[in-house]
Amino acid sequence: MYEQISKNIRERRSFYPLEYTQEEIPKEDIMEFLEDANWAPNHGLTQPWRFVVFEKEGLQTLSDVQGKVYKKNTPEEEFEEKRYEKLKKLPLLSNYVIGIIMHRGTNKKIPKQEEMLAVACAVQNIALGVSAKGYGGYWSTGGLVKFPQAKEYFGLNEEDEFMGLFYIGTISGQKKVGNRDNISDKVTWVNE
Ligand SMILES: Cc1cc2nc3c(=O)[nH]c(=O)nc-3n(C[C@H](O)[C@H](O)[C@H](O)COP(=O)(O)O)c2cc1C
């Protein structure tokens, strides 16, 4: 079992909407990934992850919202037509897009940072499920996330955080080589 898990972790790669092949993904698979997310570790059992899943016509809704928020809130001198078009296009190339939200609970003994870390663990569970099923996905912190108006759109409280969008699509067996520096350069062992 370890070998299988480890292989999935190491071979998981980010795949982007421009690489998706627009085949079908059963909704049941997405529900399984969300269930996996729900089993992420979290301090104090606060379970701070919340997800907003865009599917079907909802992808058009997200496309419209992402485009509008960018256009309305970007100063004219910074506005890029190409970026605007891309932000609108990405959801439409995907089968599902999951809005990632940290919902701050009432237990203030748990630092906010830890709530966000728990959400990241939950998202990694989704990413591993997506990869193991042979789909493509990636966590985006571009687009909507940069704008406080996104928080408003999702109806979040002051202390909640909108942490990004997880795009999911089909990739028809495409493979990618990963790239990491050696772990030995990032680890210090203490043994005396
Ligand atoms: C929190 C987080 C935010 C990310 N945001 C973006 C993003 O906004 N745009 C992007 O192209 N990739 C984003 N990524 C994906 C990374 O670019 C990707 O994980 C990295 O290139 C390593 O590739 P791999 O996932 O295939 O190993 C994000 C990943 C994480 C964990």
Image (cartoon, helix red, strand yellow):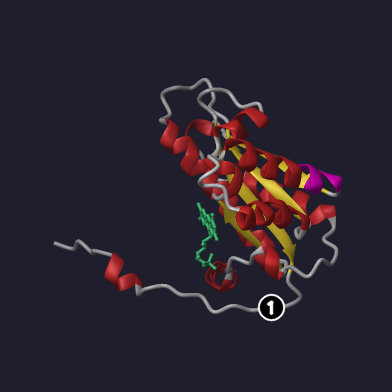
Image height of 147 relative to 174, above or below:
above
Residue 149 point in image, percent of width and height: 60, 32
Element on which disc 1 rests: loop
Front one among 57 and 37: 57
Question: Magenta span covers which residues?
Answer: 57-61
Instruction: Give the quarter of the image for residue 144.
Output: top right
Left or right: where 56 falls relative to 100: right
Residue 11 falls left or right of residue 68: left
Of 70 and 20, nearer the camera is 70
| In magenta stretch: residue 138 | no
Q: Tell me the residue that label 1 is attached to.
A: 174
Q: Position of residue 83 (x, y in %)?
A: 61, 55
For the stretch drawn in magenta, the main secondary structure is helix
Q: Nearer the viewer, residue 109 or 134?
A: 134
Q: If the image is split into quadrants, where does the C terminus sit?
A: bottom left
Say which amino acid is labelled 1: Gln
Residue at (77, 55) in percent of width and height: 92
Q: Which residue is painted at 61% across and 35% down in the image?
A: 150
Quadrant of residue 1 within the rendered picture: bottom right
In the image, residue 53 lies at what x, y percent?
A: 74, 44
